[in-house]
Image (cartoon, rainbow, N blue to C red):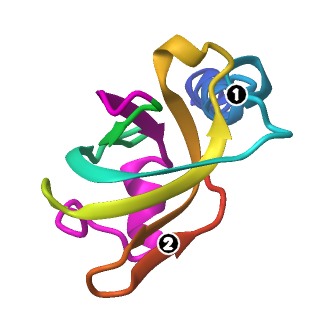
Amino acid sequence: MKRVILPLILLAFGAGGRAYAHHSFAATYYVDQEVTVEGTLVQFLYRNPHSFVKVEAKDEQGNPVIWSVEWGGGAQLTQEHVTRDTLKPGDHVIVTGNPGRDPNEHRIRLHKIVRPSDGWKWEGVIM
């Protein structure tokens, strides 16, 4: 019995260690900078390990640009009272967060999202 249990315990600890391993956000985002984008929510991808909000906004020339806004995973968002039905395509939103290092990718690491129509907002950093 000990021969079976010990490997299982070691495997559990090894898997647990990997679950906490995470990529560096500083490699993808400027963590010392913040941007704000206002536009229309196109898609809310509620999933693990990270959810994404796709927001269409106008660039400096008035052309539409889709921003990919990275958020926490579905399990984390549920603990923050955010569900897959919290945001819907067509919602007017304002998002604030760290800009991506490659400006052509139009990425943001979310710190705050506001839906002005009803005053709903979420603020914080989870990931």
Residue to which mark 2 is pinned: 122
Corner quadrant of residue 33: top right
Residue at 50% in and 49% down: 72
Of residues 72 and 121, which is closer to you in this image?
121
84 relative to 59 in the view: left or right: left
In the image, residue 82 above or below residue 45: below
Q: Quick check: 118 above or below 88?
A: below
Helix, strand or loop for disc 2: strand
Residue 49 visible in the shown view: no
Q: Is residue 48 left or right of residue 100?
A: left
Which residue is at 41% across, 56% downward?
75
What amino acid does circle 2 point to?
A: Trp
Dot 2: few (<14), some (14–19), or many (≥20) neighbours within 10 Å? some
Sequence-first disc among 2 and 1: 1
**Per the image, is 80 magenta?**
yes
Q: Which residue is mark 1?
A: 29
Q: Is residue 45 visible?
A: yes
Dots 2, 1 in contact, CB < 8 A: no
Q: Is residue 9 above or below residue 74?
A: above
- The quarter of the displayed image where residue 55 is located: top left
Residue shown at the point (39%, 77%) measured from the top left: 81
Q: Nearer the viewer, residue 119 or 46?
A: 119
Looking at the image, the residue that sits furthest to the right is 32
- Segment tinted magenta in the rendering: 61-87
Location of residue 21 in the rendering, given as x and y in whole percent from the top left corner: 70, 28
Tag 1, which secondary structure?
loop
For the point 35% across and 78% down, the residue is: 116
Crowd band around label 1 with a 10 angstrom C-alpha radius: few (<14), some (14–19), many (20+) = some
* Type of amino acid under label 1: Tyr
Magenta-span inclusion, residue 69: yes
26 vs 15, nearest the viewer:
26
